[in-house]
């Protein structure tokens, strides 16, 4: 007997064992996909993990359904990386598999039923339920089990289906299908009947009375002469200024022919169009230092201020790795993956580069995956967001983690709750590759790793071309309000600078952070704000749709006219958001073009790119936005950056609030004056003496670092301590209390005072589930793996307590 252990895409603690015959055992390799039965009627796609001869204890194995691959689609290195991830982040291999594989690799299993014949049946032989199903199938050729559940309005429908099966009224098919559909493109060419000159002449003559069709033909000749490659039908239609009906007519007349070619979805035109820029002296020195450090260190941190030319340094390093025949992964936070940066890199690397991005379709991602797996030349450099580290690299030489301080490298939900920067370090180790982290404002963790010489450190303190860092001015709005020098949310200083910039025909970015945004509605009579019925938060006002929305569960309703509590029509906006800034600006500067960039305006696929393009082309004078504006954008003509209110950043209830505020404000400020002229930054605040704001205004990263590091030590936070967070959720508040207190006490038996809570988070109920958290702080000298093992053992006991079975439990390792 032969067996295989299979990873299934569900949160099972172990892999599952199936039996295979000898031929299958000889053929199969770890990393191949197999379709396997699971439970009563399910079929899953699983990944072969091991092949062996040991029957599992405790259950009888089933044979596999069939083998889906000819060769592994997951490499051995990937399987090792998955194992590390599952163990470090305390989740299952199945959960890692779900995150790692593009969905299209996971076959779907849906039980579908259909009528066996169209002959009318004698209705008297059906029970009521059976008849309902039969009737539904008259209207629809097939139904899923789930459809039948809702038709019959009950859960267990199997017996009804079985009866109909026995009576040979219906048939069941378990359908498996690959979701990946290769993209087919339509092309146009001249019908071969007209390939001789003579016939062609005749054709053109007959067309003298159909000028539109004639024009189409002429364009086709021109294009085929110019391009010497297949002519894309959509492009052709545009160029010939014709309609699809004209094309169709020509095809019907057999003058034109259409034909189809399967296309890779992601293609880049042409070859590299720009030479790599020559580095200046400072950059060159940095590059040499990085290379020297790489001789002894696997990881190096490049601390270079905004616009110091880090990207150009990466480009040089990438070039060298590529020429040694190795692959490069260039990781960026999702939000910084702009067309701007991508097209800049494309100019250098053109067809050697592929992009892997969650905004891309499943099919596009499958293509990149396959290209990387086959080490195709167009997949030598991958640029992507956090999930790109799951690609099947074969010989990775370098990982660049740009903007390494960015919080979006961490996945919070669902599991695996991994940090892409830290996981990249492990991935690099498995490949024997180097890691270069870059940031203008490194995270405290990375910078302290560099300071303690765990990482190499290189610093770049000058902007490219010696452009000065912008001048940062703090404006005390408490005083401005008192002296009546505020117009709406704008101080007189900010307005003066806006006017000046507009007069000089320069552009402006205004920043209002999302988190503190919440334009909460409050009744000025009784002081009550409308609350979300499902969550413990106030609803926020969205002017554009005139509705109230919950940012946690999406609940929404039309804006109220009168207060729900006292009935008076005295509801008023408190707080303010990007929308309000935008409308105030439009009133004050009716002649300027004002645009807004936030989650609401960038939902659609190209919306973000369009806003940036409009700014680049100077179609926008003022752009108002959230932290989306802070990341990696390089604009030529921004002379002024305004921060509407720095305080809600600083007051955010999180141990990193100060570090994050510093990073965000420095990054936003970095958008100003990137060319010759020195930029200006105005930060409005109620608290201009705050140490972080002082440090921002004087660009004192080091000082910020030392001070925060000291604070973190005092309060037992990273990088001095590690943190594991355990969250509990339940509908029933007292059960939740009981369960979490039980868990906390069990932890305290060993971990003593380093267990904090259970405690309710700032928003204590979401989607009708109450929430409470336990934090575990782990000192440097305490074994991490032993601590995790201890937590696991408590979790097992917890799971065996029946009373707590409804409580949802989530473990988040390094929850920051
Ligand atoms: P960073 O990544 O540190 O923010 P960039 O690499 O984007 O900085 O550089 C800032 C600007 O300076 C960019 O417009 C870039 O093209 C330009 N630049 C940087 N280095 C060079 C160089 N060696 N030669 C010419 N232009 C450069
Ligand atoms: Zn809600």
Image (tube, rainbow, N blue to C red):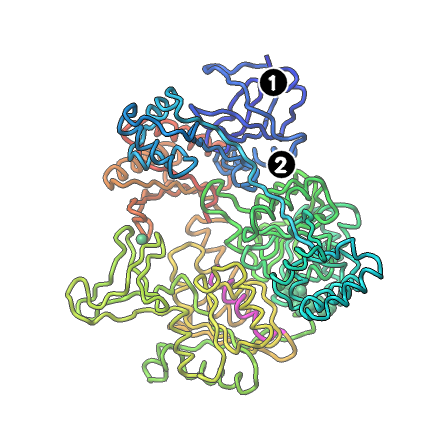
x 25%, y 58%: residue: 531
Determine the image quadrant of residue 215.
bottom right
x 75%, y 52%: residue: 292
Residue 10 in the figure: left or right of residue 554: right
Q: Which residues are magenta?
A: 660-674
Outermost residue on the top side: it is: 1
Lower sequence index among marks 2 and 1: 1
- 653 in relation to 149, above or below: below
The residue at which mark 2 appears reads as 78
Q: Under tag 2, what secondary structure?
A: helix
Residue nearer the viewer, 156 or 95: 156
Instruction: Please identify the dominant SS of the magenta region.
Output: helix
Residue nearer the viewer, 426 or 300: 426
| Residues tagged 2 and 1 counted as in contact (Cβ below 8 A) | no
- 724 in relation to 265, above or below: above
Residue 223 in the figure: left or right of residue 790: right
Real-space Cα separation, disc 2 to disc 1, in angstroms: 20 Å
The magenta stretch spans residue 681: no
Density class for disc 2 (Cα within 10 Å; few <14, some 14-19, many ≥20) is many
Percent of width and height locating residue 785: 50, 33
Outermost residue on the left side: it is: 566
Residue 400 in sight here: no
The residue at which mark 1 appears reads as 52
């Amino acid at each position: 007997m032969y067996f295989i252990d299979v990873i299934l895409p569900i949160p099972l603690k172990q892999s599952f064992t199936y039996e295979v015959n000898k031929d299958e055992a000889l053929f199969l390799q770890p990393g191949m996909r197999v379709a396997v039965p699971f439970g009563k009627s399910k079929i899953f796609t699983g990944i072969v993990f091991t092949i062996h001869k040991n029957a599992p204890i405790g259950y009888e194995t089933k044979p596999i359904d069939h083998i889906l691959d000819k060769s592994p689609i997951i490499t051995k290195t990937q399987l090792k990386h998955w194992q590390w991830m599952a163990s470090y982040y305390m989740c299952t291999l199945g959960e890692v598999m779900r995150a790692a594989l593009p969905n299209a690799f996971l076959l779907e299993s849906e039980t579908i039923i259909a009528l066996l014949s169209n002959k009318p049946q004698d209705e008297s032989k059906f029970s009521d339920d059976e008849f309902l199903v039969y009737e539904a199938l008259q209207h629809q050729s097939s139904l899923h089990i789930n459809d039948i559940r809702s038709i019959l309005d009950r859960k267990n429908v199997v017996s009804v289906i079985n009866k109909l099966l026995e009576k040979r009224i219906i048939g069941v098919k378990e359908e498996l299908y690959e979701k990946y559909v290769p993209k087919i493109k339509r092309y146009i060419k001249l019908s071969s009947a007209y390939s001789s000159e003579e016939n062609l002449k005749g054709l053109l003559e007959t067309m003298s009375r159909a000028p539109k069709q004639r024009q189409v033909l002429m364009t086709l000749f021109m294009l085929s002469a110019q391009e010497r490659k297949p002519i894309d039908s959509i492009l052709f239609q545009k160029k010939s200024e014709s309609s699809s009906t004209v094309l169709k007519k020509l095809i019907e007349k057999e003058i034109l022919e259409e034909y189809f070619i399967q296309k890779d979805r992601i293609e880049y035109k042409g070859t590299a169009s720009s030479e790599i820029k020559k580095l200046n002296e400072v950059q060159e020195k940095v590059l040499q230092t990085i290379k020297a450090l790489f001789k002894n260190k696997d990881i190096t941190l490049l601390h270079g201020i905004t616009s110091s030319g880090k990207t150009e340094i990466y480009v040089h390093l990438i070039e060298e790795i590529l020429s040694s025949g190795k692959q490069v992964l260039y990781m960026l936070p999702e939000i910084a993956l702009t067309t701007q940066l991508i097209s800049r890199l494309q100019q250098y690397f053109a067809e050697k580069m592929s992009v892997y991005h969650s905004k891309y379709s499943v099919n596009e991602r499958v293509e990149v995956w396959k290209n990387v797996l086959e080490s195709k030349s167009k997949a030598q450099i991958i640029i992507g967001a956090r999930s790109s580290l799951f690609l099947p690299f074969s010989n990775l030489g370098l990982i660049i983690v740009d903007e390494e301080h960015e919080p979006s490298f961490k996945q919070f939900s669902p599991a695996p709750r991994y940090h892409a920067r830290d996981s990249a370090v492990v991935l690099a180790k498995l490949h024997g590759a180097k890691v270069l982290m870059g940031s203008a404002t490194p995270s405290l963790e990375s910078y302290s790793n560099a300071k303690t010489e765990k990482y190499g450190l290189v610093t770049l303190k000058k902007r490219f071309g010696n452009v000065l860092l912008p001048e940062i001015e703090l404006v005390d709005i408490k005083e401005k309000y008192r002296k009546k020098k505020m117009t709406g949310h704008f101080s007189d200083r900010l307005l003066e600078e806006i006017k000046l910039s507009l007069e000089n025909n320069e552009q402006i970015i205004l920043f209002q952070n999302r988190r503190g945004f919440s334009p909460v509605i409050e009744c000025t009579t009784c002081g009550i704000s409308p609350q979300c019925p499902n969550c413990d938060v106030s609803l926020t006002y969205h002017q554009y749709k005139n509705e109230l929305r919950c940012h946690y569960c999406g609940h929404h309703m039309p804006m109220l006219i009168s207060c729900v509590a006292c009935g008076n029509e005295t509801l008023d906006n408190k707080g303010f958001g990007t929308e309000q800034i935008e409308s105030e600006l439009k009133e004050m500067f009716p002649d300027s073009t004002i645009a807004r960039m936030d989650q609401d305006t960038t939902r659609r696929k190209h919306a973000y790119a369009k806003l940036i393009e409009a700014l680049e082309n100077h179609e926008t004078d003022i752009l108002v936005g959230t932290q989306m504006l802070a990341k990696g954008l390089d604009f030529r003509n921004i002379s002024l950056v305004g921060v509407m209110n720095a305080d809600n950043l600083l007051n955010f209830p999180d141990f990193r609030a100060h570090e994050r505020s510093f990073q965000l404000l420095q990054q936003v400020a970095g958008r100003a004056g990137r060319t010759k002229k020195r930029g200006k930054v105005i930060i409005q605040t109620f608290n201009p003496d705050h140490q972080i704001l002082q440090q921002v205004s004087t660009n004192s990263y080091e000082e910020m670092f030392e001070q925060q590091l000291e604070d973190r030590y005092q309060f037992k936070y990273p990088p001095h301590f590690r943190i594991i967070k355990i969250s509990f959720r339940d509908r029933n508040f007292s059960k939740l209390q009981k369960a979490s207190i039980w868990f906390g006490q069990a932890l305290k038996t060993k971990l003593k005072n380093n267990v904090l809570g259970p405690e309710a988070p700032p928003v204590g109920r979401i989607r009708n589930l109450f929430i409470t958290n336990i934090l575990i702080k782990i000192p440097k000298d305490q074994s991490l793996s032993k601590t995790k093992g201890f937590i696991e053992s408590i979790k097992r006991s917890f799971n065996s307590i029946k009373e707590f079975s409804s409580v949802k439990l989530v473990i988040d390792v390094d929850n920051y």
